[in-house]
Amino acid sequence: MSVKIAKNSGFCFGVKRAIKIALESAEENHDIVTLGPLIHNPQMVEKLKEERIVSVDKITEIKGRPTIIRSHGVKKEILEQLERDGIEVINATCPYVSKTQEYAEKLSEEGYKVIILGDKNHPEVKALRSYIRGEAIVVANAEELSDKTFQKVGIISQTTRKFEDFQELVRTIVPKCHELRVINTICNATSIRQNSTLKLAKESDLMIVIGGKNSSNTKMLAKISENFVETYHIETEYEINKMWFKDKRNIGITAGASTPDWIIVEVYNKIIEYMGNINNKISKVEDIPSF
Ligand code: SF4
């Protein structure tokens, strides 16, 4: 019996950075807010609340307090509004997300019709659209483009999409346009996690994917894994069912880029307990055998 974790599981650079910025700001200022949840992990958002970092949904709820911009960024007009209102902005937008916003703005300024591979309801995509002059096209997959044709097209992606879907989109658009610019804005952290999840899923009898049910990159890991093996997407150890492990020998674990280490450790220890291996409990993620 073995329980292994996919390499590079858990917090990515952008999330670590956002949390560090938030915690340091909270030390200096005891009344700060984040505009929208700082990251897509409800348990971590609760922890931040204990540090007096509260999430608000609307500008009207800020009430003059210093405001942290989350790792996925916010719409351009919101930043402008905050500036007009004289609000102190602490920008924790991931630099990779900011870069994607810059590309989107530049492509549209240069006359390209911008096509974004992504989820139109995701905050990162909503923010991205606000940097584009004119209407952008957001598609979840290549099929959505149907029989459209274009003159000048610029393609970018939400940072957490699957690289293969991006390739497929590019392949589909090539015969439909006269001029094409492709900027691969899929974040490295995303593709690295997806590849190691895929490798581990192929070797496992069961995969547990840990992370927010609202986390786009975690949902993508679950989707990749379920193509190969029985997969459960959970947020915490309390969702684990002992029956899942009946007759299973090789268990794989992976975690999204916004999943904190302490949740991964709790899940691992619960699995070990259910598999009758109580003496092998661990206290840090680094102690879990990785694959
Ligand atoms: S997944 Fe990539 S783009 Fe998103 S926050 Fe992490 S490092 Fe930044």
Image: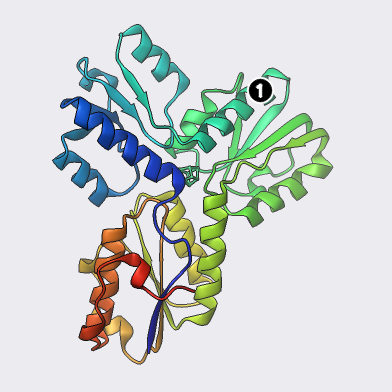
For residue 231, above or below residue 170: below
State the image quarter where residue 5 is shown: bottom left
- Residue depicted at x 41% and y 18%: 79
**Of 16 and 208, which appears nearest the observer?**
16
Residue 256's x, y, as percent? 41, 56
Q: Quadrant of the N terminus?
A: bottom left
Residue 275's x, y, as percent? 27, 86
- Judging by the rendered image, the residue that carries numbered circle 1 is 106
State the image quarter where residue 54 is shown: top left
Residue lying at the far bottom of the rendered structure: 247
Residue 132's x, y, as percent? 59, 23
Residue 106's x, y, as percent? 66, 22
- Residue depicted at x 42% and y 28%: 74
State the image quarter where residue 243 is shown: bottom left
Q: Is residue 22 visible?
A: yes
Type of the residue with mark 1? Lys
Q: Relative to 16, is 137 on the left or the right?
A: right
Local SS, label 1: helix
- Residue depicted at x 73% and y 20%: 111
- Residue depicted at x 24% and y 18%: 60
Q: Relative to 267, is 149 on the left or the right?
A: right
